[in-house]
Amino acid sequence: MPKRFTAVITKEEKWYVAHCVELGVVSQGKTIEQAQANLKEAVELYLESFGTEGIPESTGEILLYPLEVAVSG
């Protein structure tokens, strides 16, 4: 039975970094597609090692927005 998680990909210099929000699993790749594939493999390995009981799934709603905060100094 498939599980659904939230993944966020950011670009850091020459690499795309993929992060599974619910599990804290991180992977990377030189392309978005590589980062996605590597994260999928890393999450599968994580679930094989630790199981799926008690693991939260994605809520299905994702909001991304720019956040600006004042910094003193």
Image (cartoon, grey):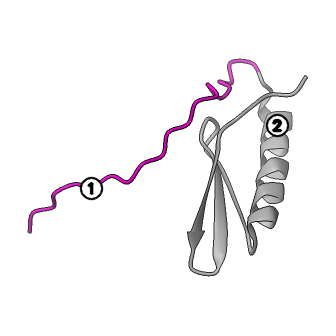
Residue 43 rendering spot, x and y as whole percentages: 78, 44
Asked which quadrant contains residue 48, the reply is top right
Q: Residue flagged by tag 2: what amino acid is it? A: Ser
Q: Position of residue 50 (x, y in %)?
A: 77, 32
Earlier sequence position, callout 1 versus callout 2: 2
- Indicate whether residue 70 is drawn in magenta: yes
Numbered circle sitting on residue 49: 2
Q: Which residues are magenta?
A: 53-73
Residue at the limit of the structure toward the top, as seen here: 54
| Foreground residue among 55 and 50 | 55
Alpha-carbon neighbours of circle 1 within 10 Å: few (<14), some, or many (≥20)? few
Residue closest to the eye, 16 or 25: 16
Image coords of residue 13 (percent x, y): 57, 80
Residue 59 versus residue 10 in the image, above or below = above
Image spot of residue 55 (x, y percent): 68, 24
Residue at position x 82%, y 37% in the image: 49
Within-10-Å neighbours for mark 2: few <14, some 14–19, many 20+: few
- Horizontal side of residue 54 vs 10, given as left or right: right
Q: Amino acid at mark 1?
A: Glu
**Helix or strand or loop: what does disc 2 sit on?**
helix
